[in-house]
Amino acid sequence: MQRRLLAGCTLVAVVATAGSLYFSEVVGYIPCELCWYQRILMYPLVVVLGVAALENRGGVWKSALPLSGLGVVVAAYHSLLQVTADAGMICGVGAGCGSVDWRGFGVFTIPRLSLLAFVLISAGLIAVAWRERADTR
């Protein structure tokens, strides 16, 4: 069960990483500063969680959960900027952090997809931590 949770978290991180690269390298959207922070937090999770899934290391939650938890905070803040009056805020890199470049299914924006990915990874890691602690009792 633990290995499946880690593999699922890895899959989410891989899809999020591929999606961010697609939006910047194929579609040509220039990432804003907050997008860069989210990338900095997501990209290492691919390797960290992938290795943990291969080696079935449940203790990875201790190092990966801070990354994904911080990613939740940054992505939530970024999503909030898009729905508040700060939509014209310029971060210094690329477009404004509050601008909406893409909208999927009428509700998803790039920061909301990032938020969803970080929440899914965090939930999976919390489940891994819970199972690991239950197994040691």
Image: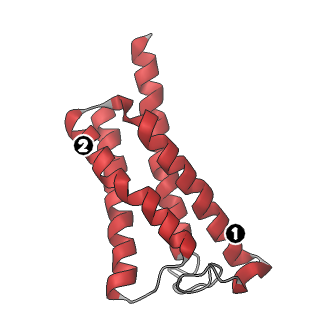
Q: Position of residue 64 (x, y in %)?
A: 43, 43
Q: Is residue 1 visible?
A: no
The residue at the point 34 percent across, 64 percent down is 15
* Label 1 environment density (alpha carbons within 10 Å; few <14, some 14–19, many ≥20): some
> Which residue corresponds to mark 2?
51
Give left or right: position of 69 versus 17: right
The residue at the point 34 percent across, 79 percent down is 22
Q: Is residue 57 above or below residue 118?
A: above
Q: Residue furthest front?
A: 92
Q: Position of residue 42 (x, y in %)?
A: 42, 58
Mark 2 element type:
helix
Give left or right: position of 11 versus 79: left
Q: Which mark is residue 80?
A: 1
Q: Position of residue 79 (x, y in %)?
A: 64, 69
Give left or right: position of 25 versus 124: left
Q: Is residue 116 visible?
A: yes
